[in-house]
Amino acid sequence: MNITSYLIRGLATGGQFALVAIGYTMVYGILKLINFAHGELFMVSGILMIYIVADLPTLPIGLAICLMAALTVFIGFLIEKFAYSPLRSAPRMSVMISAIGVSYLLQNLVSYITGGLSKQFPDIPVIGESVRFLGIKDKLTVFLSPVIAIVLTVILVQIINHTKFGMAMRAVSKDFETSQLMGIKINRVISITFAIGAFLAATGSVLYFAKNTGINHLSGANPGLKAFIAAVVGGIGSIPGAVVGALIIGVAESLAKAFGLADFSDVISFGLLIIILVVKPTGIFGEKTTEKV
Amino acid sequence: MWEKNKRTICNLILVGLIIVLLICIDTFAPATSMWFSVLRKVCTFALAAVSMNLLNGFTGLFSLGQAGFMLLGAYTYAIFTIPVNMRSNVFRNYGDSVIRFQMPLVLALILAGIVAAFFAFLIGLPVLRLKSDYLAIATLGFAEIVRGLVQLQSFGPVTNGPDPINMFTAPKSIMVYAAISGISILIIVLMINSTYGRAFKAIRDDEIAAEAMGINLAHHKRLSFVISSFFCGIAGAMMAMCNTSVSSVSFTTSMTYQILLVVVIGGIGSISGSIIAAFIFYASSEWWLKFLDLETYTKAGSKVPLLGPGFRMVVFSVLIMIIVLFFRQGIMGTREISVYDGIMKIRSVFVKDKAKGGESHE
Amino acid sequence: MKKMMALLLSVVMMMTLLTGCGGAAAGGSGSAGGTLTAYVLAEKGDTYSLGLANNFKTAFEANGGKVIMETFPTNTTNFSDYLQKSLDNKADVIFAPNSTTVAANLLANANDLGIECPIMAGDTWESSVILDAVKGTDLEVYCSTFFDESDSSSPAAKDFVAGFKDWLNNNSEYKDMNGGNDIVAAVSALGFDAYNVALAAIREAANEKGSDLTSIDIANALWGLSIDNAVTGKIQFDQNGDAIKDSAYIKKAGDGAFEFMKVQTSPNNAAQGTPADYGNATGVKLDTANKKIVIGVYEPTSGNNAAGGKQEVLGIYYANSLDDTVKIDGTDYKVELYVSDNGSLEENAVTAASNIVGQGALVSLGSYGSGVSIAAAQTFEDAGIPAIGVSCTNASVTEGHNYYFRTCFLDPFQGSVMAQFAWETVSK
Amino acid sequence: MSKNVLRVENLTMQFGGVVAVNNLTMEINEGEIVALIGPNGAGKTTAFNAITGVYEPTNGAVYFNDQLIIENHPQGKMKKLYAGKNSDMYKQAIVKTPDELTKLGMARTFQNIRLFKSMTVFDNVLTAKHLRRTSNIFTATFKLNREEEQRMREETAELLKLVELYDVKDEIATGLPYGKQRKLEIARALATEPSLLLLDEPAAGMNPQETEELTKFIHYIREKFSLTILLIEHHMNLVMDISDRIYVIDFGEEIAEGVPAEIQANKRVIDAYLGVSEDE
């Protein structure tokens, strides 16, 4: 029983989930909203890729990916514009129900278009090749995902901590009203946050679906939930936390499969979520915020 | 007597009429009519929606664990009502069932509720302290955990593992479903109109003020959570009766989303709203709007655009988004149906016409 | 910021350090001598998958083999960890009787991991999805099935294959339903036979009862039926209402088409069943008013099993296009099909079956997928309508339901056939 | 000396590094009306919230009817950060949630009115009666507590008549004019049958004529319900002519205590309000 293969694959799924988890943690940081539809956006970007490659066979793969990423960002923007911003002042529950409604709509729309059958993700040239690394034979994307996730995180953290726009995002996440008073255009910041989240989801979907090539309308549900758990475990609102949380969840699930607890892999991640929520609701990296009466 | 509770009397008359209508359908409708399977589902999901409304709508606790509690109720009911001689057949892959006896229907129903309530109490201890969106995700996680655990091979002798359970008592007549659902909803309505109901609404409106008025938040939240799960368990048992076979595969999060959307359509905080919405949602999705899924061809043989498998669900999801965004109150908002006020309003519309018409000669 | 970066790096370092020392080469297959090992992977909550897996396990262990069996939750898309388990245990054969949706990912992951041992499954894998997944890989994939288009031994089969291919090729809408090609799926052949069995039973009942025949008479007729020249071989129903079958076709997923490997026989000496006692059930009367016979088609045309469901419906449509009138007491009765989609989900079963009952159907054909068939058994029984299972192979479809018949073989049979085949191929 | 109702001992509230309330000691005897005043941001409401269990005090103790109800000392991170005094005097950590304190008999109102927005005026007060129920979930649901329900409704009607809101009893509470909402909140607090009533700026937003009426009303309810009252207020004329004793705090610390006349003349109090630097 050698652990390496399970660890590597655990890190891989962790890395792929991390990109989606960052989307959750950023949107929650800004809007205090669980963007239920984010998992579905991840699935939609996979489906978009299939239809782009099928309908525009002449388009080189690199361009196809960029077109898909652009479309995903646009959809993310639309979701925020039509489903969330009209409810900006609405009670918390109706915004959440709207998020659930969007995720339900995306699932049913894709199921209608694809007829419910699972479609094959096109082969991605470089990262799709099988490669032998440390005695394990698997697709390059498996070994690449954690690295790409960490690199993107570092870039994102630099943007947030060292650019004017990053400061605006941090301000908005700390206090909505005051940052509005300070002249920050709230809606622009929120739209851009959604756009970044959508872009990362698109990147994550290319890495993830290059490995798990069968996609149907339900392929977004499980990764979406796992990514959210990762965001909570890592400390909601903290981007590095989301990545570390995702790596932990990925490895935990793979190890469960290694030790024959395959049936429990789902149960373990949800168990982890409930334990973290109760013991340390702010997660590993999150800071404590006292509720002012 | 009339003056004091005229509204309740009118509403009781309405309920009486509905019961008579149901009896007619039950006896006279041809055995094959769609009314049977539709009304059975409507009664089941009306109770599920009302019990979710008790929690989300009246106590302000946003929980997404309904599928988990319904699963517990369905499994408990199914396991305890399989005739003794059929047990080994159903539990074929796991030797035989641990339970050796068969329970009468009513007892099994109550047990289904109790089992769901017991698990609600357990999960409630850690989870009810959480803020609303975390509570939603934690209860969603709980439902997934329950679904995962029930399917385990090691639990085979108790829950038949991943194999479906069938052969249990599944009544056919609508009156059984209407009775169970009716009594349960009546109990919930009585509770909401009691002093405890007011305490729940206080918690929904303003937790800090409620606590300052001496309402113990932990105790009342747990009470509402456990009672809502009790009736969710009974709704789960009714769902087992509807489908005549129970397998954990059908208790997915999308079922919880459907119940939530029924509550939203009906109006969060309105019991009659949930019942009306359950009827509209399930009657149309199971029957009236079924044609949306069938590829139909016009006489000229050309395919009617858009219609095809899955289109019905797309129409539903768009409809629900419209309701969530523009009609946040849903059909009834937080108002309850009142026949008396309805009649008065209609009468006043007529009276006004007469008055307008009669103005000339006064 | 510094603290966080340090922690992140240490996590990655710890992982690579671990992998460094543990890099022993895994992979490679075929245990040197010793007992043959099979790795069985089934989907939790899928009745067909679990039934077949359990039967394969008992049969393979009976031969003295070792079986490692695991189940995965529905909607799983990444099977690498499971397949890695088969490599770690040096499995000689992998048996994964799952839906084509699962197969697409499973085979892709198998190719990623460079799995060399043969991968086998049941009748669901006889579909173009498997051919696509195998294309361009050197995976060795076998599946058992009820029928093979290149088996020209029986004339009925030859005519059916030729006629069905023509019929598919000259209306594109049906060809699309078949997955865009004219490969004859086994389930289409089964659908074709099931329709003809139903018609034969109706004609039998008409001879005795004339125009006041009811669905109960059709059920009784089915018990006594014996059709020798059916496309998928002789059809006779045993005591449970299952067709007495003693052989299955084994196919290998080749490049673009399935290659016929062999007919694997396994003794099945069940005798023809005596009619069950239907008590005083009245069933559904013949629709003498508008002179039509409705046959229900209870199939998944959406959801996970849509591909197989649609191919089954095609077989029934084709059979209906050849023979759609029954003469009863001198008048011609038009046979009409009513397709009711169960969406491959057990919770839709009762509603979809009630739709068929609502149309006044005398017989119901289907369904692809054992779970949905079992779930609808009670509804057909209450309406007194016989149902003929076309390709649902799980034993409990007919067990205890004397209104449910079946024209295909059962999991216990298919499991033992595949175990036998696996044992023979691997021990060579 | 009549019985001591509330005694606050070295109460300190510290958020991170900021000491909001520093070593406050206060005593209120039965039947007294005591006011707690001080410039904006002096820590009045924070002290109030610590006494009513909304916050956990960082250090100090609170006695109600000579019975220890709240005690705490700096723990965990706070040990190092603690900038207040005599943290060694308290060892235990007794915490009470607001509903437990209300059950003991301490009812409160809020600085920004917190009425139940979906309920009518009548139900707002009726809900507060829930605390004194003797029924449980079953007897309440199946209407076996008819006489208790009847009693609750009568008492609610009486209270509403007292605050002259009975005529609007079926209107939605948050629809009332500001002054009336204030009086409703007081009526709701009275519904929990308290012995100590804590009022948080009851006259805020009232015109002089309404404030005058409020003074009479507070005197009246003290007699009728034999209450002890602690209030925070900015309207000096209300404070001066209603309170028996006054505590003044500034920057979290107590700077003066005494009867209204003394306080009016107290130099430090005037400086604190007028913001003159205390140089001499």
Image: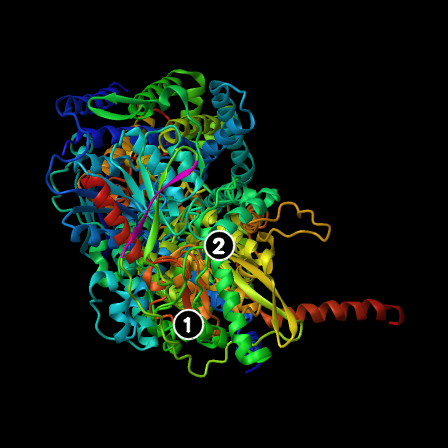
Q: Quadrant of the N terminus of chain C?
A: top left
Earlier along the polypeptide chain: callout 2 or callout 1? 2
Q: Quadrant of the C terminus of chain C?
A: top left
- Mark 1 lies on residue: C223
Q: Residue C420: horizontal and vertical position, in percent? A: 24, 49
The reply to whether residue B147 is visible in this rendering is: yes
D70 in magenta: no
Left or right, B17 with respect to C349, comes to: right
On what subunit does the disc labeled 1 rest? C
* Above or below for A11 versus D188: above
Left or right, C36 with respect to B207, comes to: left
Amino acid at circle 1: Trp
Identify the residue at horizontal 25%, vertical 55% (top origin). Answer: C55
Q: Quadrant of residue D145?
A: bottom left
> C351 or C189, which is in the foreground?
C189
Kindly identify which numbered label has been placed on residue C156: 2
Q: CA gap, disc 2 to disc 1?
A: 23 Å
Q: Residue B232: horizontal and vertical position, in percent? A: 38, 62
> D150 or D178, which is in the foreground?
D150
Q: Quadrant of residue D190?
A: bottom left
* Above or below for D162 versus C424: below
Left or right, C306 with respect to C61, comes to: right
> C223 or A131, which is in the foreground?
C223
Amino acid at circle 2: Ala
Stretch in magenta: C257-266
Q: Residue C257: horizontal and vertical position, in percent? A: 43, 37
